[in-house]
Amino acid sequence: MRVIIQENYENMSKWAANYIAAKINGHKDERPFVLGLPTGSSPIGVYRELVRMNKAGEVSFANVVTFNMDEYLGLPHEHDQSYWYFMHDNFFDHLVDMKPENINILNGMTDDPEGECARYEEKIASYGGIDLFMGGIGVDGHLAFNEPYTSLTSRTGVRDLTTDTRIVNSRFFGNDPEKVPAQALSVGIGTVTDSKEVLVLINGHNKARAMAAVVEGGVSQKWTCSALQLHKAAIIACDEAACGELTVDTYKYFLDIEKKERL
Ligand code: GLP
């Protein structure tokens, strides 16, 4: 696993956006580049930078197919907290050449959640899998909506949200955890780790405990993001604040080994 430590959120976002753009630009197949995407506050800076680069002609999304990680069950597209709404509002609507038919987001209003999730897995497979899955993590180390103790081989399915996650996410629902949907559809940890590359963003001091568990702890269902340790090509891009609970040795090691990558 690589850990790219940047000074602040802005530099972390620029680094990740440059990395993704370089991967898209370097993709010479007929087959589209398949990109997995997260929601949340962590990726907003990456989306902003990718939009800037797209408008400046530095990266094209014409041959990119996207799959989002997750969606709340029971929220329609037009709900301003649905992930469908978030993705269009923060990203897709601003790209000059993203094809709407290439955007895939789990349908939170489905009356057949299991079927919806099975079809999502099939569609990912029909493209030959995901080339690069970008993600963020929760304060409890969850990746997508794979809460602690979700199987590390899990596939796309229905997930119950923990009380803690509903409390954390209630900041977007008038600070009322009861208004946060109790369930979501989410790709599994296995779905993410099947991707050729995984790039996870971790920023802010409130993620420092999870960051230490994921980087320095063992592979454990308790911190589902720790499954990245078994991936062949996983990267964590983070800011200094997220490194607060790492040992000095670990912190210095990654700064040293990745010194050319520091913005
Ligand atoms: C939600 C999403 C996750 C996301 C997490 C962190 O729970 N399901 O995919 O990574 O929030 O969000 P933020 O980036 O706002 O801290």
Image (spheres, rainbow, N blue to C red):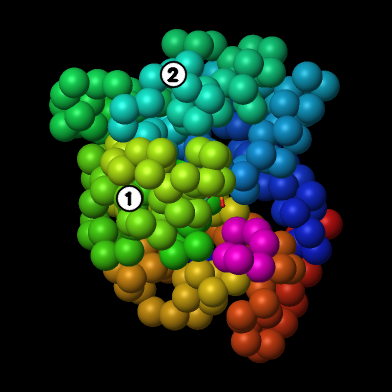
**SS at mark 2 in the image:** loop
Report the side of 25 relative to 223 (left or right).
right
Residue drawn at point x = 29 percent, y = 21 percent: 109
- Work out whether mark 1 precedes mark 2 in sequence or the reverse, and give the earlier one: 2
Give the residue at mark 2: 77
124 within the magenta span: no
Residue drawn at point x = 23 percent, y = 51 percent: 154
Residue drawn at point x = 53 percent, y = 46 percent: 175
Residue 101 lies, in percent from the top left, at 45, 11
Magenta residues span 202-207
What amino acid is found at the position of numbered circle 1 in the picture?
Leu
Report the side of 194 relative to 197 (left or right).
left
**SS at mark 1 in the image:** loop
What amino acid is found at the position of numbered circle 2 in the picture?
His
Query: Mark 1, residues whose alpha carbon is within 10 Å: few (<14), some, or many (≥20)?
Result: some
Q: Quadrant of residue 142?
A: bottom left
In this figure, what is the number of numbered marks?
Answer: 2
Query: Of residues 223 and 29, which is closer to you in this image?
Result: 223
Q: Which mark is residue 161?
A: 1
Q: CA distance from mark 1 to mark 2?
A: 20 Å
Residue 247 lies, in percent from the top left, at 62, 87
Q: Quadrant of residue 246?
A: bottom right
Residue 218 lies, in percent from the top left, at 38, 79
Residue drawn at point x = 47 percent, y = 37 percent: 36
Query: Of residues 105 and 98, which is closer to you in this image?
Result: 105
Q: Is residue 217 above or below residue 226?
A: below
Quadrant of the image for the C terminus? bottom right
203 within the magenta span: yes
Q: Looking at mark 1, is its residue's CB closer than 8 Å to ligand 1?
A: yes
Q: Looking at mark 2, is its residue's CB closer than 8 Å to ligand 1?
A: no
